[in-house]
Amino acid sequence: MTVTTTSGDAFVSPDSPPLLSLRKVNKSFGAVDVLKDVDLDVRLGRVTALVGDNGAGKSTLIKGIAGIYSFDSGEYFWEGQPVEVANPKDANAIGIEVVYQDLALCDNLDIVQNMFLGREETSAAVLDEITMEERAKSTLAGLSVRTVKSVRQKVASLSGGQRQTVAIARAVLWNSKLVILDEPTAALGVAQTEQVLRLVRRLADNGLAVILISHNMNDVLAVADDIAVLYLGRCTAHVQAKDVTHSQVVELITGGGLAPSSGDGIEVVPVELHIDAPTAEQGDES
Ligand SMILES: Nc1ncnc2c1ncn2[C@@H]1O[C@H](COP(=O)(O)OP(=O)(O)O)[C@@H](O)[C@H]1O
Ligand SMILES: [Mg+2]
């Protein structure tokens, strides 16, 4: 696949102050320690890929960031300040939006209705259709989305890539600063994957911070600036995409670590191997 944007070329320096920083966050479900002392830094203008095998804790980590779960311990900093994100409203209020795998779009509604679902703009208690339509159009235009013919099309008539586009556009309507995407290309063919990856890159190029969860190393290396690796609930490596090869990322995901010749700027944290007992939810989603 050829995606014209290149990873590691972000305008924003890897040394800029993080938008989001997590320090030593932990989360257990009963006896299962799912996240263990996880550190993560996410920066505006950069795509941070969150990678790891099934069950590594990726979804749990983003649900903690998004306020769906609260972390049991650890620190959560936003723009350098400690914050409490106790529920999804708190996360939305500081500028976090998540695009979940199922997208949560309503097929029988059109694009505008979907983009404003649950948050319809009201003027004098009446839905202001004109404003909503204009904002939907300008948001799509701002993301250089040209594949959608009319914002009054029903979502049922859209392709997988277009649906993903609508879900992403909905996430950026709300003055968001951080957009989190859980496997946005998992169900897409080659051309649509490329279209969505361009959009992911554009979000960061427009100045947003993006967390991209993906199993696809080609996608990750095509658009990510930074890669955070989760392995059995620990964040075992933070690397810049430009410093690693495809097979090195796979090695990190599978817990092999990196050969010492891998180069500068690669921080690999050794992990203690221990296998949790399987639980009912194991491997049910990614
Ligand atoms: N609500 C829950 N209750 C109990 N265990 C859970 C729950 N959610 C996730 N887990 C467990 O936490 C681990 C990490 O899951 P998850 O965050 O979904 O991983 P990933 O998204 O990386 O595949 C798995 O072992 C999973 O079974
Ligand atoms: Mg998951």
Image (spheres, rainbow, N blue to C red):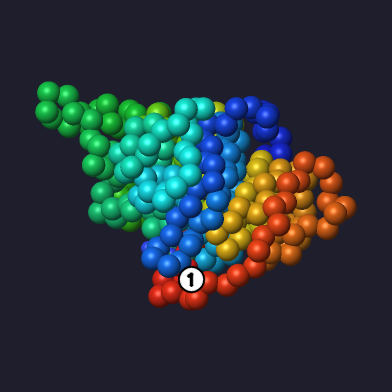
Q: Is residue 25 left or right of residue 6?
A: left
Query: What residue is rendered at 48% in x and 34% in y?
Result: 77
Query: Height in image: 29 above or below 108?
Result: below
Q: Residues within 10 Å of mark 1 (few under 14, many from 20)?
A: few
Q: How many marks?
A: 1
Which of the two residues, 119 or 274, is positioned nearer the viewer here?
274
Question: At 48% from the left edge and 71% from the top edge, which residue is drawn?
Answer: 283
Residue under the point 25% across and 37% down: 119
Point 26% across, 43% down: residue:
117
For ligand 1, the image quadrant comes to bottom left
Tell me if 67 is positioned left or right of 234 in this view.
Answer: left
Q: Is mark 1 within 8 Å of ligand 1?
A: yes
138 is higher (above) or lower (below) than 197: above
Q: Is residue 185 visible?
A: no
**Residue 97 falls in image quadrant:** top left
Q: Relative to the observer, which residue lies in front, 246 or 189?
A: 246
Residue 143, x across and y down, in percent: 49, 34
- Residue 107 spot, x, y in % from top left: 29, 55
Give the labeled residue for mark 1.
Answer: 283
**Horizontal and vertical percent position of residue 68:** 35, 50
Q: Residue furthest top?
A: 124
Identify the amino acid type marked 1: Gly
Q: Residue furthest left?
A: 125
Which quarter of the figure has residue 198? top right
Image quadrant occupied by the N terminus: bottom right
When the figure is inspected, residue 181 is found, relative to residue 190, above or below; the finding is: above
Front residue of this view, candidates 23 and 145: 23
Left or right: 142, with 266 as reference point: left
